[in-house]
Amino acid sequence: MYWVALVLQVLLGLAFFASGYPKVTRSKQMVESFQKNHFPVWFLVLTGALEIVATLGLIVGIWVPIMATLGAALLVCVMLSAVLTHIRRKDAISHIAPAAVLLLLGVVLLAIHHPLA
């Protein structure tokens, strides 16, 4: 299970850094996307910051397992919010699926790392 967790941590860490960085830096495309969906810019930055903090938890968690647990828990919270937002807005499944897959991978990683697992 160690290798499964390690691969998941690295892949999810890369994905969430790639997703969070443009939000924190307020890239034009991200700002337009959030404004189009009626979210304020501060929420864009907050979302990106949470994604980067989750990334840091996953990467540091390679050496300090509790950090991986915390990073995965944060990732699950962020992605659950994303999935529920897409569903509430009645978005197409093509918009919901990526967030749902990341949510599922986060749950798997959390299950692997959780002390009771």
Image (cartoon, rainbow, N blue to C red):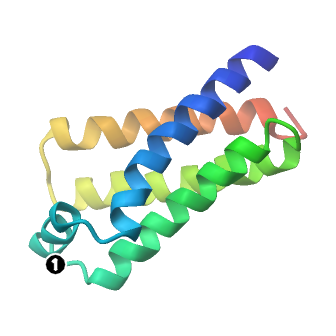
**Residue 1 visible, this angle:** no
Instruction: Please tell me whether residue 42 is drawn above or below residue 100 in the rendered image.
Output: below
Quadrant location, the C terminus? top right
Q: Position of residue 95 (x, y in %)?
A: 20, 43
Q: Residue at x 56, y 51 (%)?
A: 75
Q: Which residue sits at x=61%, y=54%? A: 54
User: In the rendered image of this protein, does residue 44 appear above or below residue 75?
Assistant: below
Residue drawn at x 71%, y 52% is 57
Residue 85, quarter of picture = bottom left
Kind of residue at disc 1: His
Q: Is residue 92 left or right of residue 71?
A: left
x, y (%) of residue 37? 14, 70
Badge 1: residue crowd in 10 Å (few <14, some 14–19, many ≥20): few
Dot 1 falls on a residue whose secondary structure is loop
> x and y percent of residue 73 in the render?
66, 52
Q: Which residue in the protein does label 1 denote?
A: 38
